[in-house]
Image (cartoon, grey):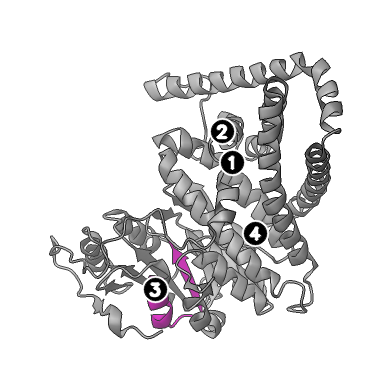
């Protein structure tokens, strides 16, 4: 199986560079940590039985063990179900030029600098027929030179790129909206402005709309672009592989991918236009929604009775946070969006929104059970550690490493890479530094802040410097005159 240069990991016989030595030493430390955790849990094996007996004498202990056992059974059953589905998963066949529909690619950008130009260039360099392709790049009132880079990219691809500029920052949803209402193609594709696609990605992404008549949206396969920039991107690379090539592949088999990612997704334009006003004006707890636009659009497509698929060979590489603070902000935004859209999905998933809805209902129930069950388990686990720290800490660490076996083994099998070891590091990192996010998101679900973007002060107008080379003039849109 072909391995990309940045996912191949350290291979025997390769010249040892500074980076390779760092990689090798990091993976050695992971192996040592795993061994230490296993030995520590084994050393406590005689004490755990007595502690569990004492735990069952407490009311909260009985509830904790009951929830833990129930979640274990449900997740094991779900895991086997997903393994069965993934076993038969295949991406839709790639269409020929004559079969492909017209396609508009919308790239919203805010303070991305030259990254947005790289994204535009990667789309323009693809093998999609240019007479069927339009690229709309929207500068969401950036305070840096993003508009300049968009104009330069438009000058390089004058017959493909339409540059648009919002006079002040209005949010990603608004930027996408401006692209949607200006698109004329059969299919609209959204790509984040810090992402790069492969040459055949767009063709592969759009193909399911041709091969299956009931497809309303397609999720791309998101991988980490900046894997070499630190420990966090390395861990997320393994996590993303499992999340997309396993979880979304299984959801696709029952036509019910729950979230089409902002990094790369495609939609039937006629379906988008039917719900565009509702999507743009979506409110939660009385406030206008500024986050979760990708999951919200997915819900609206599913609600119309259409399938949402995953296309594994439509690959996009995207930038991820390299620091803990940025990662927490990204995950917190995702968690709040997940809670909100889970509530929205509950409004229609058990109604006759389509004929083959059992798979969607099972995916929904699994998501809900894990959302609330996991939150309860986090508080219960914290109580156990405070009650008997020596015994429970060792067992919980062991449990985290056992859970990492599945994504780690999946990554190792698919990519034949020792980078699978990062799954074990990520499980410990999540336990120590990220487990708080789900319960905190539940408590603050009404928070509507984007978190991962630095917004200009309210009412300010971002003005870009003049382009360094001649460029195509783009549309400058007044925020106050935009139709909603």
Rendering quarter of residue 345: bottom right
Return the residue nearer the eye: 430 or 234. 430
Q: Residue at the spot x=53%, y=69% of the render?
A: 266
Residues at marks 1 and 2 touching, judged by CB atoms closer than 8 Å: yes
First reached walking from the N terminus: tag 3 or tag 2:
3
Which mark is on residue 432?
A: 2
Stretch in magenta: 175-191
Camera-near label (3 vs 2) is 2
Disc 1 to disc 2, C-alpha distance: 7 Å
Where does label 1 land, which residue? 435
Q: Is residue 298 left or right of residue 20?
A: right
In space, the residues marked 3 and 1 are separated at their CA atoms by 32 Å
Give the number of the mark in front: 3 or 1. Answer: 1
Q: Does the rendering let one see residue 387?
A: yes
| Position of residue 3 measured from the top left corner of the image (x, y, whole percent) | 54, 39
Disc marking residue 91: 4
Distance of label 3 from label 2 (alpha carbons): 36 Å
Residue denoted by label 3: 174
- For the residues marked 4 and 2, what is the alpha-carbon distance in whole angstroms? 37 Å
Residue 336: give x, y in percent of width and height.
Answer: 54, 58
Label 2 residue SS = helix
Q: How far is mark 4 from mark 1, CA to CA?
A: 33 Å
Q: Are marks 3 and 2 in contact (CB under 8 Å)?
A: no
**Observer able to see residue 5:** no
Measured as percent of width and height from the top left, residue 83 is found at 77, 48
Using residue 173 as the reference point, say whether residue 296 is left or right of it: right
Which secondary structure, mark 4?
A: loop
């Amino acid at each position: 199986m072909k391995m990309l240069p940045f996912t191949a990991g350290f291979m025997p016989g390769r010249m040892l560079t500074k980076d390779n030595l760092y990689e090798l030493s990091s993976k050695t430390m992971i192996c040592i940590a795993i061994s230490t955790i296993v030995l520590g849990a084994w050393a406590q094996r005689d004490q755990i039985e007595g502690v569990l007996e004492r735990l069952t004498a407490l009311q909260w202990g009985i509830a904790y063990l009951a929830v833990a056992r129930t979640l274990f059974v449900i997740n094991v059953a779900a895991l086997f179900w997903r393994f069965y589905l993934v076993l038969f998963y295949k991406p839709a066949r790639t269409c020929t030029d004559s079969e492909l529909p017209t396609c508009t690619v919308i790239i919203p950008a805010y303070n991305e600098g030259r990254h947005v130009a790289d994204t535009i260039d990667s789309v323009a360099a693809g093998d999609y027929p240019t007479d069927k392709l339009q690229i709309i790049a929207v500068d969401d009132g950036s305070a840096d030179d993003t508009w300049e880079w968009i104009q330069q990219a438009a000058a390089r691809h004058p017959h493909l790129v339409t540059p648009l500029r919002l006079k002040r920052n209005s949010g990603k949803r608004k930027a996408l909206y401006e692209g949607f209402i200006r698109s004329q193609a059969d299919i609209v594709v959204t790509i984040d402005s810090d992402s790069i696609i492969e040459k055949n990605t767009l063709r592969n992404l759009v193909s399911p709309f041709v091969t299956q008549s009931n497809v309303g949206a397609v999720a791309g396969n998101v991988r980490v672009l900046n894997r070499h920039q630190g420990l966090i991107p390395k861990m997320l690379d393994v996590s993303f592989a499992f999340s997309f090539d396993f979880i979304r592949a299984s959801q696709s088999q029952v036509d019910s991918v729950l979230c089409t990612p902002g990094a790369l997704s495609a939609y039937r334009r006629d379906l988008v236009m039917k719900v565009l006003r509702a999507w743009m004006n979506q409110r939660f707890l009385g406030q206008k929604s500024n986050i979760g636009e990708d999951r919200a659009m997915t819900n609206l497509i599913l609600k119309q009775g259409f399938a949402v698929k995953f296309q594994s060979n439509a690959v996009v590489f995207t930038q991820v946070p390299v620091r803990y603070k940025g990662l927490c902000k990204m995950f917190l935004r995702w968690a709040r969006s997940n809670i909100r859209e889970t509530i929205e999905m509950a409004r229609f998933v058990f109604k006759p929104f389509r004929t083959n809805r059992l798979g969607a209902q099972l995916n929904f129930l699994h998501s809900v059970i894990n959302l609330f069950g996991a939150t309860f388990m986090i508080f219960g686990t914290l109580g156990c550690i405070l009650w008997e720290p020596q015994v429970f800490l060792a067992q919980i660490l062991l449990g985290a490493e056992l859970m990492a076996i599945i994504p780690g083994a999946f990554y190792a099998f698919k990519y034949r890479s020792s980078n699978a070891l990062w799954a074990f590091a990520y499980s410990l990192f999540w336990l120590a530094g990220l487990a708080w996010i789900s319960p905190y998101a539940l408590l603050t679900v009404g928070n509507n802040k984007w978190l991962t973007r630095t917004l200009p002060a309210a009412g300010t107008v971002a003005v870009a410097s003049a382009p360094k080379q001649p460029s195509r003039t783009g549309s400058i849109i007044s925020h106050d005159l935009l139709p909603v």
